[in-house]
Amino acid sequence: MAQNTSDAHILVSMTYVSRTNQDMTEQQLSDILQQARENNAANAITGMLVFKDNIFLQTIEGSRARINRLLYSLIADTRHYDLQVLETRELEHREWAKWSMNYAPSCAENSAIYLKYSTTEDFNPYLLSFESVRGLLDELSR
């Protein structure tokens, strides 16, 4: 039997940013996180999510086929808009293997980290280089 090439396991990481369509309540964000954790665990996807000032910044990793399918569903999700892929790359090993979806809350203790990597007073990952995004995600995950 021939192998289905769409299921070939090439591990990739994708980082994207998007804006919410409306102010998000804590409960709505909690529901999104719960759904992401369940779906990601079922699909062998791991990652990190940041939500601040109605902006999502997320890195997800998994097989290329599953990440591509997830990207299509993210694009179709009406809870957010202006989705921009900041970076996609192949991986030799997972960087977020401990979490189906790690989450960094917007809180006072993280304020200095946001400021360290920001190019403006406001959180705007659309303006960050990918190196700054990686540094931000790495520090927030600690």
Image (tube, grey):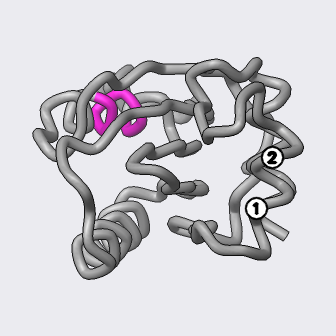
Quarter holding the N terminus is top left
> Which picture quadrant has residue 98?
bottom right
Q: Amino acid at mark 1?
A: Ser
> Which picture quadrant has residue 42?
bottom left
Q: Are marks 2 and 1 in contact (CB under 8 Å)?
A: yes
Residue drawn at the location 53% of the way across and 35% of the way down: 9
Query: Is residue 113 found left or right of 102 in the rendered image?
Result: right
Q: Position of residue 96 (x, y in %)?
A: 70, 58
Q: Which residue is more in the foreground, 83 or 44? A: 83
Query: Is residue 132 found left or right of 86 in the rendered image?
Result: right
Q: Looking at the picture, does residue 69 appear above or below residue 127?
A: below
Query: Is residue 125 found left or right of 69 in the rendered image?
Result: right
Q: Looking at the picture, does residue 25 appear above or below residue 15?
A: below
Q: Looking at the picture, does residue 79 appear above or below residue 127?
A: below
Residue drawn at the location 61% of the way across and 41% of the way down: 123
Residue drawn at the location 35% of the way across and 25% of the way down: 83
Circle 2 packing at 10 Å, graded few (<14), some (14-19), many (20+), is some
Q: Looking at the picture, does residue 4 appear above or below residue 36?
A: above
Residue drawn at the location 15% of the way across and 40% of the way down: 77
* Residue topped by disc 1: 111
Quarter holding the C terminus is bottom right
The span picked out in magenta is: 66-71
Q: Which mark is residue 115?
A: 2
Q: Position of residue 13 (x, y in %)?
A: 61, 34
Q: Which mark is residue 55?
A: none
Q: Secondary structure at mark 2?
A: helix
